[in-house]
Amino acid sequence: MAEVTVQRYDGPDAAGMCEAFLPAYREVYAEPPYREGPDDVAEFVEMFARQATRPGFRVALARDGAELVGFTYGFCLPEDTGWWHNLLAPAPAEFTAESGWRTFAVIELAVRRPWRRGGVARRLHAALLAGLPVERVTLTVRPEPEAAPARAAYTRWGYRRVGRSQPGDDSPVYDAMVLDLG
Ligand SMILES: CC(C)(COP(=O)(O)OP(=O)(O)OC[C@H]1O[C@@H](n2cnc3c(N)ncnc32)[C@H](O)[C@@H]1OP(=O)(O)O)[C@@H](O)C(=O)NCCC(=O)NCCS
């Protein structure tokens, strides 16, 4: 295994990166508890294209030589975000208020199985957030036992659970987490 390198892309450069990490997306999210198939992947590609136009949009990719081994991306929540409306127990307005630059949302973070437990996710996460002028970071994570590595990583990096979140009537329920920055 060569040394893994991590690179971040911002704005339009980031928007063009879907193709580069899509095979890794397909591989990782075929695993439980996600079990995504071709329809889910197609839906993801459409969602990524919409999200890629958001302010603060950025992607970080990890490569082992030329091989794509991990990815993460996110964007800043806009003032009119529906993000906090997904919480199953409503939170106070001072918590959910957004300015456009208060909160960065991490949408995906994944590392292919053979490259796990080597700090690749930690480096991807650090590269994604580096220099962001926001107060806090939020993400959602599945509560099933198979997602325990992700929950362990987020807790280790300082995230706290703020409630349960469901982005749509047909979607699974997630744990919503927040990391307060410095
Ligand atoms: C979650 C995931 C990205 C972690 O990637 P990784 O490169 O193995 O993570 P790292 O090596 O940087 O580990 C970061 C921390 O996570 C924790 N961690 C990671 N895997 C763990 C495991 N299997 N068991 C317990 N803790 C674990 C550790 O605390 C670790 O820090 P430490 O080893 O320094 O103590 C990876 O397991 C993955 O892609 N899972 C499938 C996709 C997924 O669930 N993504 C999250 C969607 S919300």
Image (spheres, grey):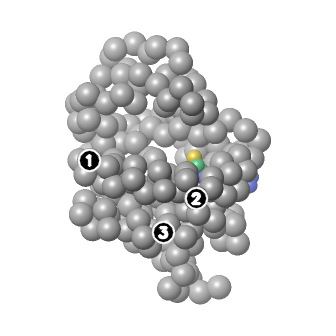
Q: Quadrant of ligand 1?
A: bottom right
Report if the CB atoms under discs 1 and 3 are less than 8 Å apart: no
Q: Position of residue 99 (x, y in %)?
A: 22, 30
Q: Position of residue 93 (x, y in %)?
A: 34, 14
Seen in the picture, residue 147 relative to 67 is either above or below; the reply is above
Give the amino acid type for the residue marked by disc 3 in the picture: Phe
Q: Earlier in the sequence, mark 1 or mark 3?
A: 3
Give the amino acid type for the residue marked by disc 2 in the picture: Pro
Q: Which residue lies at the image location 40% right of the left edge and 13% below the top edge?
A: 92
| Label 2 Cα crowd, 10 Å radius (few <14 / some 14-19 / many 20+) | few
Seen in the picture, residue 107 relative to 138 is either above or below; the reply is below
- Quarter of the image holding residue 104? top left
Give left or right: position of 55 versus 63. left
Q: Which residue lies at the image location 30% right of the left edge and 22% below the top edge?
A: 97
Query: What residue is pinned by disc 2?
Result: 38
Seen in the picture, residue 23 relative to 110 is either above or below; the reply is below
- What is the total number of numbered labels drawn onto the structure image? 3
Query: What residue is pinned by disc 1?
Result: 54
Q: Position of residue 33 (x, y in %)?
A: 71, 46
In the image, 102 versus 81, the foreground residue is 81
- Quadrant in the picture for the N terminus: bottom right
Describe the element under mark 1 as helix, strand or loop.
loop
Query: What residue is pinned by disc 3?
Result: 21
Give left or right: position of 96 versus 146. left
Marks 1 and 3 sit apart, C-alpha to C-alpha, by: 19 Å
Q: Which residue lies at the image location 47% right of the left edge and 51% below the top edge?
A: 43
- Quarter of the image holding residue 171? top right
Looking at the rendered structure, which numbered label has been put on residue 83?
Answer: none
Given the current orientation, which residue lies at the most extreme right position? 145
Q: Which residue lies at the image location 30% right of the left edge and 43% below the top edge?
A: 76
Q: Position of residue 88 (x, y in %)?
A: 53, 18
In the image, 62 versus 87, the foreground residue is 87
